[in-house]
Image (cartoon, rainbow, N blue to C red):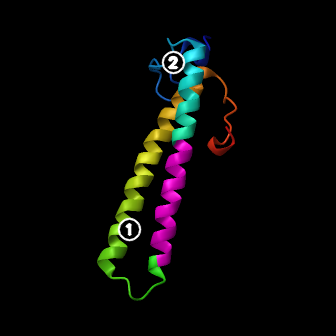
Amino acid sequence: MKDASLSGADETNGRQSRYSSMLKSDLKALAISAIREHRRLLAADQAVYDEWAHASDDPSISGSVLQALQNEYISRQKKSENQQEELSEILDALGYVPDVLLENNE
């Protein structure tokens, strides 16, 4: 039986990964970039969530503002989910998770 991960096939649906033909050095650079982007998205999502939570506790904030914050948070969550799926595909092709320092420590 052929190992799907070694052949470059996506194990979830049996199709060829778009990253399987890339050089490992290029994949590593792409993975590091995607990890950093994912961290930025998570931080921005958290900031919107915190603002929404704070606004929810403030009776002077209108329902339309709360709805807008909720919609923004949900939209950001969908974007983060899509980016996470792409990151996962990159890491699957690379075969490991590279060490990535926090940006303020670099």
Residue type of the residue flagged with mark 1: Leu
Quick check: is 56 in the magenta stretch? no
Q: Earlier in the sequence, mark 2 or mark 1?
A: 2
Q: Is disc 2 surrounded by few (<14), some (14 to 19) or many (20+) residues within 10 Å?
A: some
Percent coordinates x, y for residue 63 in the rendering: 32, 80
Percent coordinates x, y for residue 40 in the rendering: 52, 47
Q: Start and end of the magenta stretch?
A: 38-54
Question: Compared with residue 24, is residue 84 higher up or lower down, i.e. above or below?
Answer: below
Task: Label 2: state its secondary structure.
Answer: loop
Q: Nearer the viewer, residue 5 or 86?
A: 86
Residue 103 visible, this orientation:
yes
Identify the residue under disc 1: 69
Task: Label 1: state its secondary structure.
Answer: helix
Using the rendered view, name the quadrant where residue 64 is placed: bottom left
Instruction: Quote the CA–CA distance across marks 2 and 1.
Output: 39 Å
Question: Compared with residue 93, is residue 60 higher up or lower down, i.e. above or below?
Answer: below
Identify the residue under disc 2: 9
Q: What residue is at 49 percent from the left and 48 percent from the top?
A: 41
**In which quadrant of the rendered image does the C terminus lie?**
top right
Q: Main secondary structure of the magenta part?
A: helix
Percent coordinates x, y for residue 61 in the rendering: 37, 83
Residue 11 visible, this orientation:
no
Q: What residue is at 69 percent from the left and 42 percent from the top?
A: 105
Q: What residue is at 70 percent from the left and 32 percent from the top?
A: 99
Q: Nearer the viewer, residue 104 or 37?
A: 104
